[in-house]
Amino acid sequence: MTILHLCLIFSALLFSLGLAAALARSSGILVLLGIELMLNAANINFIAFWKFSPNPENGTGAMFAIFSIAVAAAEAAVGLALIIAIYRHQSSIRLQDANTLKG
Amino acid sequence: MTTFPIITLLIIAVITLGITAVALFLKNIIHCSILLAVSWVGIAAFYLWAGAEFVAFAQVLVYVGAVSMVVLFAVLLTQRKQLDLEKLTGTVGFRELGKLAAAMVATVLVIAIATTPLTGSFDAINEPVITVRDIGIQLRDNHIGALLIVGVLLTVALLGAVVVASAEPKTEE
């Protein structure tokens, strides 16, 4: 068991917590927050593998994590806008209520 | 010398996982989002531990600063009437199935990680091995195309978010 194993297990547990939130909650906002947590777990893996790579001075993993954070921010903005649009049509952010395509 | 980074990592991991687990199973959405902001701070602490200081700054700015504010605004915009909090937590069957699936995924992942032999040098050094200056130079020299594309992507995504979320004028009928 090395430090890299510990980092990967930390990331796997965080991913599972995000998955549990995305699957078990029915509020749209909390589902989106669970997806954000899963993205964060993936970023932790990038950083962990980069830190223990043979030549970390290249900075490839850190660069990838930065771009990944930027894309995650765009995804969060669009997702929350969609939730607000759903709320305007259904007056609820319960995902079980959002079962029609036509608003 | 080698035990100190492990202890720091364990403290960061336990605190972050504990806060996240508490946050995700609270009933009040506002409490959830504020606690999740704290757990994003924990992830930023992990990045600092790993020596990726610029990524940690970006994490604090983007997640703790921006995403948590957007989430709070979404919560406030969608909770005009007093919500039946019990209704927001899903049916019991869904909740239990979701937790069961997540627990199974966690088991499979942890077993797979723990049984994988990883070779290489694992001397945890707390010095940042890449400085902000290096990252700036790399962004300018090697990744300038990706940087421009991310800028365009963010602009398009935020404009699209405004268009989707803004109320359409009631001109029809």
Image (tube, rainbow, N blue to C red):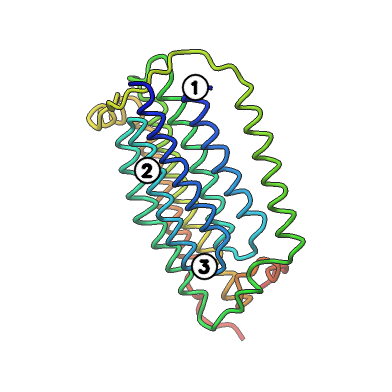
Q: x%, y% of residue B142? A: 34, 25
Callout 1 and callout 2 share a chain: no
Residue at image point 39% right, 62% down: B69
Across and down, in percent, residue B16 comes to 45, 46
State the CA–CA distance, disc 3 to disc 1: 37 Å
Task: Describe the element under mark 3 as helix, strand or loop.
Answer: helix
Question: Can marks 3 and 1 be said to lie on one chain?
Answer: no
Q: In the rendering, at what x and y percent does residue B77 appear?
A: 47, 74
Whether labels 3 and 2 share one chain: yes
**Which residue is label 1 attached to?**
A2
Image-based side of B5 in relation to B108, left or right: left
Q: Quadrant of residue A30?
A: bottom right
Which residue lies under the disc numbered 2? B44
Considering only vertical position in the picture, is B106 above or below A60? below
**Residue B28 % position (x, y):** 52, 69
Disc 3 packing (10 Å; few <14; some 14–19; many ≥20): many
Drawn side of residue A25 relative to residue B18, left or right: right
Q: Chain of mark 2?
A: B
Q: Quadrant of the C terminus of chain B?
A: bottom right
The amino acid at mark 3 is Ile
Between the residue at mark 1 and the residue at mark 2, the CA separation in whole angstroms equals: 21 Å
Q: Is residue B133 above or below residue B46?
A: above
Kind of residue sitting beneath label 2: Ala
Chain letter for mark 3? B
* Chain at numbered mark 1: A
Q: Earlier in the sequence, mark 3 or mark 2?
A: 3
Q: Please give the residue where the numbered disc 3 appears in the rendered image.
A: B29
Q: Is residue A87 above or below residue B66?
A: below
- Where disc 1 sits, the SS reads loop
The amino acid type of the residue labelled 1 equals Thr
Q: Residue lying at the far bottom in this picture: please name it.
A: B173
